[in-house]
Structures are given as C-alpha cells and as structure tokens.
Amino acid sequence: MEVYSSLLFIYGFLPVSLLLFYITPKKLREMMLLFLSAAFCCLLSLYFLIFIVAFAAVNYIFMHLISRSRRSEKLAAVPLTVGIILDLVAILAFRTQFFTWLHRMIRAPESFYPVGISFFALGAIGTLIDVYKGRIKADRNMVRFALYIMFFPRLLMGPLLRYKVFTNILDNRSENLSGMGVGMTIFVKGLAKKVIAADNLYMLYAAAGSSDVGEISAVTAWLGAVAYILCLYFELSGFADMGTGTAYLFGLKFPQSFNYPLFSIRLKYFAARWQSQVTQWLRRYVTKPIYGVCRKRWLREAVFIIGWGLFGFWYTVDLGGVVWGILIGAAVIIESRLLRKKIMNFTGMIYTFFTVVICGVFLSGDSLGSSVRYLFAMVGGNGVLADSDSFYLIKSYIVLLLVTMYASTDLFRNLMTRSGKNRIKAAIMAVSPVLVLAVLVLCTAFISYGGSSHMILMKL
C-alpha cells in the first residue's frame, strides 16, 4: 500500500512516466497511459498485471454481451447477473478466507492480493448496470475500458468514478504547466498527510493499544481511539490526494474523495464528505432503486442505514465494519429527526467528531467483543481514569494531536477564501512552489526514516 509514497515511485517511476507521456504524440497518449498503468501493475506483481488484464477483458466481454442482448430485457439480465456475480466473487475471494480453493485453482501466489480490487470491481459492476439500463453505450474502445480499470493514479484509493465520468475527464484533459503545478501541490499534500501525519499518529495508536484492553485507562483508550480515526483519515485521504495529484500531472482532473469530513458541523455532512464517490455509488446502484418502492419514511430511513452497513462491510468485510456503518447511518437519521433547529457550528463539529471516534472503535477492533471491551474502557469501566502511560502519551503526542486535528478541518481554506486580501493570496501563491519543494524534501526524510501507518489498512 505504500507504492505512491515510496522513493522509487516519487523519484523514479513518476518522472519517467511524465517524460514518456509528454514526448508521445497527443493521439497516442491514451495508449501511453495504458502502457504506464500496465508497467505500474507489473512493478507491484507480474501476477497482478495478468489478473487485472484478465479482469478487464472479462468485463469488457460481458459489457458487450449485455449491449447485444438489450432488445430482450430478460436475456440481457443473464450476462448482467453473471458479470456482477463474477466481480463480487473477485472481491470476496481475496478479502475473505472462504475462497482459498479459488486461490489454488488459479494458482495464485500465497501472498498475492490484487491492490484496489474493491474500487475497480465496483466500477466494473456500475458500468455493466449502466449499459444494461441504457445510460451508456458499450464502448468498443478496449484501450479506454482497460484504462478505466487499470489507470494507476486511481488504482489504490480511487476515486470511484462512473465510466461516463471517467471518459469525460479523459476527453477534457488539460495538459499545461498550471495543471502540473496544481497536481504537484496536491500530491505533496497527500504525501505529507501520509508520511508526516498518519505515520506518527499510528505510533500513538499502537502505543495506546499495546496494553491489555482489560487494564487500559480511560484516557489512554480515548487517545488510542482519537489517534486511530485521525490516522485512518490522513492515511486514506493522503493516498487519495496522491492519486488525484498524479492524475492532474497527466492533465486529468479527478474530484476529491475526502472533503474535510471529521469536523463537519453535522453528521449528515460527514456522511456526504467521507469517501464521497463510494457513498454516491451505493446510493446510485443500491439504495436509490429501493427508495422508489418505499413510500413510508421509516422504510427509506431503514434502507439508508442498511446502505451504510454495506459501506462498512465494503471497508472491512466483517461484522465490525457493518456495525460501524449501521451506527453512522443511524446517527445521521437520529440527527435529522432531533436536530431540526440550527445549532452552533462549533457544537456540531464537536459532537460529530466524538460520534465518529466512538463508532470508529468498531472499525479498529479485531472482533465485536474486543470493540465492546474497548468502549467499556473508554467510559472508565476498568476502574482507571488515567495512569502514568496516559500522561506520558499526552506529553509526547499532544502537539501532534492538536496540529493534525486542525489540519483535518477546512478552517485555513475558509480563512483564505473569505480574507479578500489579494496581497496575502498573491504572496502565498508566490512562495507556494518553495513551500511545496520544502515539504517534499521533509517528506523524503520521513520516508527514509520509515513509517508503518499502512498497517492500519490491513483490515480494509
């Protein structure tokens, strides 16, 4: 998972890729992007390259089978159903232990894992459904479809885009120095999130979790829970920003996946800003079609909660993720019923953050039982409010926590937007290349030091 933040990628693969891309004639640049994506997959694993090419080919075939059968809705439903089942099996086969027989059948290496399968498999399913519904036509351009599945800047952490949106972005590529500057800024921002914020937050999370859950103090438990959710945010959004920034370098303007969700003034805004393309995918292809047959409000609310339960399952493929999603969905519904009047923004930010932290315990736990015991420790159930470990962790990490909590808000961005002082903005724009370079150098030093925040994604 550390591919984007590796020195080989930053100082080797990416510069060479940009050079090859921009010396290629414009008519052949999509082909070059596919070649570079194949090279990226091959660097991860030759077996992964074979797997993802086969995956793209199978879905391309089913897309055209659906298209040719659309005159008969029942007939078209057959390749649609088979294609969806194959894609879902591909996800479950590599994210659960129930398909080890399939691993043996395809002779996959023991440590093989198709990185990003949760994203490109959902994208393929959405494309098959859109062709079946007549929303898009089956694209005959195999290069474009393969690029949709394999494009390396969005392979690891999305964004999860519909095929039509992706091809529109391809058609409207803007290859210029200004876009490259924006892309480099976004990439370095994501890199800093990962190697400076997430890696150090993981150290706090690991330290807080090193004690037995039956003996941990309440303060230490809270420190671990807060560190986990902050680390998860900076890890996921960091990789997403690195992918988006890389895409900008090639002229493709991808949307944001995370829009400062943790300190939203309402839970409903958190739900809309956290991994937004995935929640939109679930709404478009799962919950929205069901809403049409649910006339009663409580039924639509139940569907909404179930949709978030599926989102949680997509994250962890276990009950902990399902419980996390159900709790978030239920909290959004409760908020919509109880908080009909306006509340202070600060109050909303505080209760949103603490709700997300508490629910996040079910994402981090190894089992439902361990998550419940951890929550018990957070409310002082172990009979220890604070101990020497708590004070040591506070002393060591309080600055990191305060800085990362501020960095996870949009306060600075809003301040710049509302300042209206052109001189200040011009000054920041003037020094931004120097700042980006300085942060890149700092991140390089941190990469050399080595971090392990990617371990937090082992369950996801």
Image: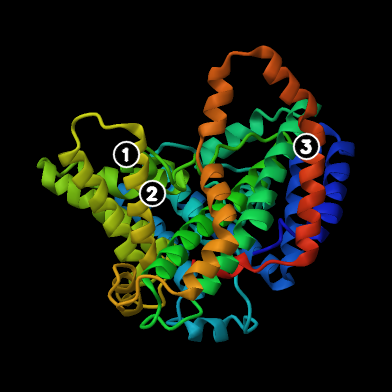
Kindly identify which numbered label has been placed on residue 347. Answer: 1
Q: Amino acid at mark 3?
A: Leu
Q: Is residue 173 left or right of residue 339?
A: right
Q: Which residue type does callout 2 highlight?
A: Phe
Q: Quadrant of the N terminus?
A: bottom right
Reply above or below: 391 against 16.
below
| Label placed on residue 417 | none
Dot placed on the residue nearer the N-terminal end, 2 or 1: 1
**SS state under label 2:** helix
Observer-nearest of 148 and 353:
353
Badge 2 density bin: few <14, some 14–19, many ≥20, Cα 10 Å: many
Q: Which mark is residue 435?
A: 3
Residue 228 placed where, x, y %?
A: 48, 62
**Residue 301: image x %, image y %?**
19, 47
Along the viewing direction, whichever of 104 and 358 lies nearer the viewer: 358
Q: Amino acid at mark 1?
A: Thr
Position of residue 354 relative to residue 218, above or below, is above
Q: Earlier in the sequence, mark 3 or mark 2?
A: 2
> What is the quadrant of residue 362 in the picture?
bottom left
The reply to whether dot 2 and dot 1 touch (C-beta < 8 Å) is: no
Q: For numbered disc 1, what is the local secondary structure? A: helix
C-alpha separation, residue under disc 3 versus residue under disc 1: 34 Å
Residue at figure coordinates x 57%, y 60% from the top left: 397
Instruction: Report the residue marked by disc 2.
Output: 353
The answer to which of 243 and 71 lies nearer the viewer is 243
